[in-house]
Amino acid sequence: MSVKITGYKTHDGTDAMNTDCDYSSAYVTLYTSADLVGHGMTFTIGRGNDIVCAAIRELAKRLVGKDVEELFANMGKTWDYLNADSQLRWIGPEKGVIHIAFGAVGNALWDMYARSRKKPLWKLIVDMTPEELVQSTAFRYLSDVITKEEALVMLKAKATTKAEREAKVREIGYPAYITSAGWLGYSDEKVARLTKEAVQAGFNHFKMKVGADREMDLRRGKLIRSIIDDPQYLPTGQQPRDLNAPELAGKNAGPTGSVLMMDANQVWDVPEAIDYVKSLAELKPWFIEEPTAPDDIIGHAAIRKALKPYGIGVATGEHAHNRMVFKQLLQAEAIDVCQIDSCRLAGVSEVLSVSLMAAKFGIPVCPHAGGVGLCEYTIHLSLIDYIVVSGSMERNVLEFANHLHEHFVHPCSISTKGRYNIPDHPDGGYSIEMHKSSIEQYEWPHGSYWVNEHPKLQAQALSQSE
């Protein structure tokens, strides 16, 4: 008896009134005629989450009545089908709210696929043949950079040694960097405390936010450097890392082997970005992330060229809304680090295409993971990239933000050496299933958090929606 998708349900994990909301989730569950389900979500930072949920519902409708095994048999074809509604496509195409919603629906389907095979998502894909993986990837509009045939050759070249890489990463974990210590708005005392804690936790890559004030950035950067470069703060018994090691090459590592990165969150015009980052060169960052508008490919190329003599690279991608933007960033030699987002791109099939292009260009993929559920998602994507696509994790690091993991049934975790542990639960899927209690508590507007703790806010919003 075939199993068909019978319905879906969305959950708005935010509020419509709070302008200071930081982390929100547009969440979807796909249901079938059997017990099999699939969970997916996309990350927002507050208002507009309800709009994303509406878009998710429109896309999920296209799956109702479909046989799941027919969908799983060719996930690339399924991706094309989900992307082919001409009226929904018109309000993209392949960008904006529709594409973000596609990320949630596509990821829910991949979660269902992994659950049906009793494997975590990364293992499902790692165990695919090169032919199956190519068939699962979104290739439209990319043939001027990479063809299916070329991708197949790349994957076959790595296939004979993928078991060795899987065993290695299971043993040592996947390298991570911490992004929670250098937020703007933290006092110097808090930055120092969090940085010391991160060093003790085994991290050696640290990211700070910049762009609000040059003198403040210099002061905070020197403070962070004074801690991460000082051997006295290393964990007991740990020696400074080898500065000649491949994983530190070209990263401006300090005397202990620690690496500093900077993130500007799109704040500058191109000339301003060049001037500002040059003035921070004494801090020796590995890269500047999102120095200007995320769609400005030529601007990023100009910034990269200007900063190259200072040994500072350029990273971007968390707001790159589709594979074509990444294609052009790579073609224009505009980035040193590719930062895919697990749900701004339209699910796993599109992520695979970007990973393949980045591998062809020799650019490391270091996903964005600074939001609710993103760490849970992206460890799978980094494992896939390492084991079957690029074959390398020496220069890669995956962002880790130490909050909100308690809301997930299969949360990610970090070892004492500052590396991701490998998700391995057979029912874990894509690790994005939320606890029912978290949904019941925080769903807008009827969750217990709003009813009991913010009744006036809830009543105001509901009255405005009538």
Image (tube, rainbow, N blue to C red):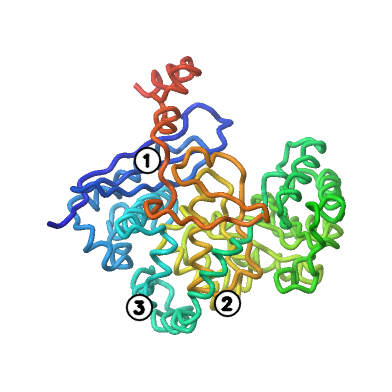
Where's residue 148, x and y in %?
39, 79
Q: Is residue 327 visible?
A: no
Quadrant of the drawing holding the C terminus:
top left
Estimate the spatial distance between the alpha carbons at disc 3 and disc 2, rounded to whole Å. Answer: 21 Å
Tell me which corner region of the image, top left, top right, bottom left or bottom right, holds residue 302.
bottom right
Lower sequence index among marks 3 and 1? 1
- The residue positioned 42% from the left and 40% from the top of the image is 434
* Relative depth, front residue between 66 and 210: 66
Q: Which residue is mark 2?
A: 361
Looking at the rendered structure, the kind of residue marked 3 is: Glu
Looking at the rendered structure, the kind of residue marked 2 is: Phe
Where's residue 79, x and y in %?
33, 62
Lower sequence index among marks 3 and 2? 3
Please, is residue 190 above or below residue 108 in the view?
above
Q: Circle 3 — which element? A: helix
Counting the numbered discs, the total is 3
Marks 1,2: beta carbons within 8 A: no
Q: Is residue 184 visible?
A: yes
Where's residue 83, x and y in %?
32, 59
Q: Which residue is mark 3?
A: 131
- The residue positioned 44% from the left and 84% from the top of the image is 153
Q: Circle 1 — which element? A: helix
Quadrant of the drawing holding the N terminus:
bottom left
Q: Which residue is mark 1?
A: 53
Estimate the spatial distance between the alpha carbons at disc 3 and disc 1, rounded to whole Å. Answer: 34 Å
Q: Is residue 218 toward the left or the right of residue 338 in the image?
A: right
Looking at the rendered structure, the kind of residue marked 1 is: Cys
Where's residue 186, x and y in %?
75, 37
Tell me which corner region of the image, top left, top right, bottom left or bottom right, holds residue 443.
top left
Label 2 crowd (10 A; few <14 / some 14-19 / many >=20) = few
